[in-house]
Image (cartoon, rainbow, N blue to C red):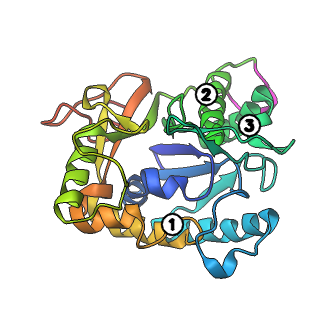
Amino acid sequence: MTADQRLLLVHAHPDDESINQGATMAKYVAEGRGVTLVTCTAGELGEILVPELEHLSPDELAEHRRGELEAAMKELGVTDHRFLGGFGTYRDSGMKWHEDGHAVAADDVHENAFWHADLTEAATRLVEVIREVRPQVLVTYDQFGGYGHPDHIQAHRVAMYAAQLAAVPSYRPELGEAWDVAKIYWGAMAESRMRAGLRLLRESGDTTTFEGMDPDGPMPFFVVADKDLTAAVDAQDDVEKKMNAMRAHATQITTDGPFFALSNNVGSTAWGIEYFRIAKGTPGPVGEDGLETDLFAGL
């Protein structure tokens, strides 16, 4: 990784990266910045949305989603993407829905599921990546994993712990020279943007996208109050790359699903401006809205 500025993203399953930060990834690649993606599982237990592929076993789906991820990364221009510990090291943990509307661990979790991973062992595997890539910025989920998925929560834990361990010179020196990640961000969906998008959807007559969600009512767990946001990366010029990357994840995302419906009604701002809140480091200069416009601001 020879770029002067380097971003590391840690995600749970193939497709999470494209949905959450695909536009930012494409923008930074186009600007010559280094972008590395670490995916923690192959998504063996993802819901298959393509009828002709419903016969795939979990292991077959994992192989298929590995191909989808490769195709998505080509759309974004990302050439450095890896599975934590190598493909197949950790298995998708699965999930079920809690009555309160968020995800929780499934009743039956595979013994090799990421949710069951030893935290220090998994974090140490990421330490090796951090010390190799030496990113100034790391992006992952918040402590709730956005909506409670156990693999998202575990990815958060692993990423945060690995960043600490990587900075300790005496910890596993054989894994490389210590590196302190200057800024860590948690991806976010801005409350104001979500409410505005929902309002436009409802005004257009669409009552099924994000069904049951009221533009003026309670927001889902993954929505973050604007006052808690730190950065907004405007990558609208690269939003089509993001949408193409999402299309590449065809088993998980349909073109008539909520993501594309929101994009069709709201335009490029729906997914071309991506939000973050800082978890470590000092925010840099901000724009007119009081938010950083660049995750590397101040570095």
Q: Counting residues from the N terminus, which is met first, the one under dot 1 or under dot 3?
A: 3
Amino acid type of the residue tagged 2 in the rendering: Ala
- Tell me the tag on residue 163: 2
Which quadrant, please, contains the C terminus? top left
**What residue range appears in magenta?**
171-177
Q: Nearer the viewer, mark 1 or mark 2?
A: 1
Whether the residues at callouts 1 and 3 have beta carbons within 8 Å, the answer is no
Residue 114, located in which quarter of the rendered image? top right
Q: Identify the residue under disc 3.
A: 115
**Inter-mark Cα distance, 3 to 2:** 19 Å
Residue at disc 1, secondary structure? loop
Amino acid type of the residue tagged 1 in the rendering: Ile
| Depth order, front residue of 106/170 | 106
Is residue 8 found left or right of 125 in the rendered image? left
The image shows residue 246 at horizontal and vertical percentages of 47, 66
Residue 291, located in which quarter of the rendered image? top left
- Tell me the tag on residue 253: 1
Residue 250, located in which quarter of the rendered image? bottom right
What residue is at 69 percent from the left and 33 percent from the top? 127
**Inter-mark Cα distance, 1 to 3:** 23 Å
The image shows residue 223 at horizontal and vertical percentages of 37, 38
| Depth order, front residue of 72/112 | 112
Q: Residue furthest left?
A: 288
What residue is at 61 percent from the left and 43 percent from the top? 133
